[in-house]
Amino acid sequence: MTALETAAEPREIHRLDYRPPTFWVDSVALEFDLGEEGTVVTARLSLRRNDEVAEGPLELDGEELETLSVAVDGRVLGQGEYTIEGERLTIPDLPARCELETKVRIHPESNTQLSGLYLSSGNFCTQCEAEGFRRITWFLDRPDVMATYTVAIRADKQRYPVLLSNGNRVGERDLGDGRHEVRWEDPFVKPSYLFALVAGQLASHAGDFTTVSGRTVRCEIWVEAHNLDKCDHALRSLQAAMRWDEEQFGREYDLDLYMIVAVDDFNMGAMENKGLNIFNSKFVLARPDTATDDDYEGVEGVVAHEYFHNWTGNRVTCRDWFQLTLKEGLTVFRDQRFSADMGSEPVKRIEDVAMLRLRQYAEDAGPMAHPIRPESYISMDNFYTATVYEKGSEVIRMVDTLLGRDGFRRGMDLYFERHDGQAVTCDDFRAAMADANGRDLAQFERWYTQAGTPRLVATGRFDAAAGTYSLTLRQECPTGQREEDFRALHMPIRMGLIGPDGADQPLGFEGEAAAGAPTERVLELTEREQTFVFAGLTAEPVPSLARGLSAPVLLELEEDEQRLAFRLAHDSDAFNRWDAGQRLFGAAILAGAAALARGDEFQVSKGLVEAFRAVVTDPSLDGSMRSLAMALPSELELAQRMEIVDPDALHRARRAVRRALAEGTRTELAALWERAKPSGAYSNDRASIDRRREANVALAYLSCLESPEWTAAVAAHFDGADNMTDSQAALATLCQLDVPDRQRALEAFYAKWKGDPLVLDKWFTLQATSVLPGAPTRVAALAHHPDFTWRNPNRVRSVVGAFAMANHSGFHSADGSGYTLVADAVIELQGANPQLASRLAGSFNHYKRYDQHRQQAMRGALERIAAVDGLSKDVYEIVHRALA
Ligand code: ARG
Ligand code: ZN
């Protein structure tokens, strides 16, 4: 141990250190005696020595357990027969097969970490992924140990009438003393992280689903009774997801019962426990007056995501946690495709890529950069990241693009055929895809081993005499990674060449007949640099590359304003049209920021205004597409592209561009608002959603004019709204304006919704993301509001999280008060809820990209966190990576 290390330094786990367990667990019988002051858990494990590992004691994981007894084959073990050291129980001499019974006491009533068994709104619930099961009982708490479970739950009948666990309900009895017992049995083997238990006062909204083979599955959404009228969308989403997985992947649901429980206190989005999903209520509850169109999409997507895990995650699971992307990347890919099929494919793709670039590209460029299959971790909970999930999904999407839809399906079929009931690795998935298609995907493994976002530098040369266009694509090492570690990736680049008339040209390779050539191709890159020569061209084409973002790269292609405007108007790929607009607006804002930083004036070009006008008026765009195309890249996203981030100049430049666009097109914007503004009662059909989107974005632009007329229109929109989409949009706009209507609307909104936690979260968020001067002071006041609590993750995220992640200029206030506020929050939370604290601590990850003054302030905040006595390992890992 060196002088700098201390005994308390958390242990780092490495992927290559994987060893199989010394024992398997074939079956588990659990008994819960739930109590207000302590719960007793009895666990009987059928153990079987792993023949591959002939030696070694049994080692079980446990955290915060009070061990009451340990017995083997009915005989209680004495003190010398086992040891408990820290979070490990070791039993040296065990027969090759035996039954181990442990009895422990745990304290759900004081579990603030929300991992293991805890209470939410007075009801018991669990969260076991990744390593929460060890907080319930002694176990081989690792995903490669798969067992069948039977569960008996005993509790007070009055207080906990509903008792749920995985699988099928097989019995119930009254215990006579005011308590009752319900028994559950899950016939499918599962790892411990998929265990779930719920007990409390709940009611269910239920419906049936008939599977493709004609079985009836009962679907139940469990909520507190007053929320029963907000469950129908979740139920319909579940039924739609069940049908879709049958149709697209031939996967049928396997139990007779599927339950979703909504809880208010939850660290993440939701959890796919076998037959008993537990959800953050944010992704279940929806009613038109309480949830926005985007919230509805969120519910649909998360319900589907957790459902799809039944096959990609539960039936086939991960061997170890380094393989997390095996189930998460694949399941995100599946839910993205599902949502695209339910709504609009290009709209969904744009939303997903926007998120990828904002969160994942940033992660890739900072201290938390890791391959989608990480090499090491201190706390696994820190690796439920945009990289593992969203980039993981992009990697699967590339497999789909390379193999084609049918080839991908063949690979999935083989994957399930080979591995149903097993815990496997990312390599197993790749092998199934390759073998089912007779393809070599060896080089493709690099996507699993290399961190960072590769840059793809494109250059084109037109030879008028020969009628050829040479396109050279060069892969460059990601920012922040070492050149010597970078090796060429196997990537599909979907592309087209646009002719002067705006039409895609036939793409005949040199030496090929041009006639009948396709107008779009997928180029397969496998080398650092490759040149493709297209022939038969009569005029210089405009390349449209990486359509649909066919690979998760940063495409670098020199394009001036004219060319971007041309593609914004003509690119046949809807995604690339949007992307051209983003590049165009982004470049203008960044040039403006640079000018302002120099103390120069800057003017928004006429060309930019005209390009914007074309978007506002283009009759071919639907309202969702129009609203996406009109949205300027966020400050957070643009900051990633600045050499040294100047938050003030960036904020002023973006504001100025917004205002100039609004002034330049006020007539068209007003016409758009007139055409799309609410008329008649709310409806949730596609066309109405599209209209709401374009109306709200038009009104938000018009509000930048800061004219009394448009401010009044926003206020009237707020007052007249009969649905949360319009209500929230209008209030969000008012929150950015220094007008009396802002305070009045906030008060009205509060008075109406103070009893609904999810809506109240919105009220907090809209204020925390207001860029009006004095943001840190306002946010500090919100954290002292009587409705604020550090114990509810949604509430903390709605104030501190929203401020740190979605209020760039406020968080980076020059006086450092934003940093102090967030660091204080991390310190306040880190003991009680390390997972939540660690997410907030990540807000400082990019401090090195800011000016000296801000760097120092953020570094100071990180050091202050690092100095906390007994810092949780989750936060430790984040701040030490950042400070390294
Ligand atoms: N498997 C869950 C999902 O993606 C995420 C659960 C992660 N929870 C945690 N505490 N790390 O749907
Ligand atoms: Zn998932």
Image (tube, rainbow, N blue to C red):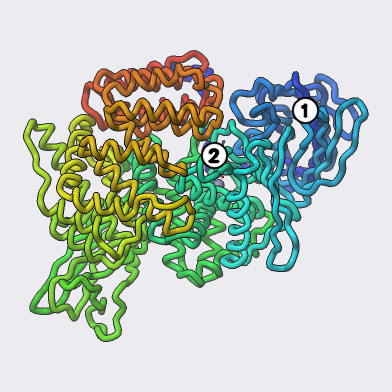
Q: Quick check: can you spot residue 115?
A: yes
What's the residue at 34%, 63% (across, down)?
Answer: 526
Q: Earlier in the sequence, mark 1 or mark 2?
A: 1
Point out the residue furthest to the right here: 176
Give amino acid for label 1: Arg
Q: Can residue 527 be seen in this view?
A: no
How packed mark 1 is, by other alpha carbons closer than 10 Å (few <14, some 14-19, many 20 or more), is: some
Foreground pick, 740 / 71:
740
Give the image quarter of residue 482.
top left
State whether residue 867 is above or below residue 594: above
Residue 787 vs residue 482, the one in the foreground: 787
Disc 1 target residue: 159
User: Can you give x and y, in whole percent of width and height, for residue 773 in the image?
Assistant: 26, 24
- Percent across and percent down for residue 213 are 72, 68
Q: Which quadrant of the figure has residue 202?
A: top right
Number of numbered markers: 2
Residue 659 vertical position relative to residue 430 in the rendered view, above or below = above
Q: Residue at x 43, y 44 (%)?
A: 725
Please name the amino acid that badge 2 sits on: Lys
Q: Residue at x 44, y 48 (%)?
A: 390
Residue 308: horizontal and vertical position, in percent?
A: 59, 54
Q: Indicate left or right for 343 with 774 as reference.
A: right
Whole-percent x, y for residue 299 in the image: 54, 47
Q: Which residue lies furthest to the top in this view?
A: 869
Q: Name the residue under label 2.
A: 282
In space, the residues marked 1 and 2 are separated at their CA atoms by 25 Å
Quadrant placement of the C terminus: top left
Q: Is the residue marked 1 within 8 Å of ligand 1, measured from its CB?
A: no
